[in-house]
Image: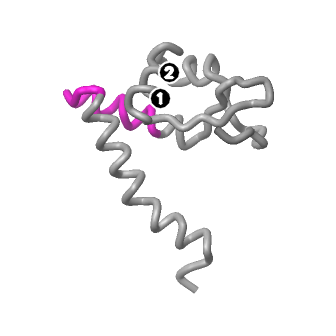
Amino acid sequence: MRAATDRNLLRIGELSGRAGVSEHLLRAWESRYGLLQPVRSRGGFRLYSEADKSRIRTAQAYLTDGLSAAEAAALRQALDAFDEPAAQAEQAGWPR
């Protein structure tokens, strides 16, 4: 993982409290499903972005709708993959 430089990142305890899920669950979603993509601080702590927080909220909504954790993670990752080309084009200044 790359080193963190953004000051707006959250440590796992902060994200856990804001999202209303346990730290254990966040680690599980990261390791089992690849749902979260934290960067690491120089001290090795996980640091989560707003995108990670958004992924958690979306996954929680899918779980509430009756999907399994694996299904929720897969659907959210599919949405991320679908949105990625648009985000890359926008960052490149397209359309002009």
State left or right for residue 16 relative to residue 59.
right
Q: Residues within 10 Å of mark 2 (few under 14, many from 20)?
A: some
Q: Secondary structure at mark 2?
A: helix
Name the residue located 47 percent from the left edge and 17 percent from the top edge.
Answer: 21
**Residue 60 - label:** none
The answer to whether 72 is drawn above or below residue 16 in the figure is below
Residue 95 on image: x %, y %: 53, 82
For the residues labelled 1 and 2, the Cα–Cα distance comes to 5 Å
Q: Quadrant of residue 96?
A: bottom right
User: Does residue 43 show up magenta in the picture?
Assistant: no
Q: In terms of image quadrants, where is residue 16? A: top right
The residue located at (72%, 38%) in the rendering is: 8
* Kind of residue at disc 1: Glu
Residue shown at the point (64%, 21%) measured from the top left: 14
- Is residue 78 positioned above or below 28 on the image? below
* Secondary structure category for the residue under label 1: helix
The N terminus lies in quadrant: top right
Q: Residue at x 39, y 26 (%)?
A: 32
Q: Nearer the viewer, residue 59 or 37?
A: 37
Along the viewing direction, whichever of 8 and 2 lies nearer the viewer = 2
Q: Are marks 1 and 2 in contact (CB under 8 Å)?
A: yes
Which mark, residue 30?
Answer: 1
Which mark is on residue 27? Answer: 2
Label the magenta part by its dominant secondary structure: helix
- The type of residue carrying mark 2 is Arg
Q: Residue 58: within the magenta? A: yes
The range drawn in magenta is 55-69
- 80 sits left or right of 14 in the view: left
Q: Quadrant of residue 12?
A: top right
Residue 69: x %, y % from top left = 29, 27
- Is residue 95 toward the left or the right of residue 14 in the image? left
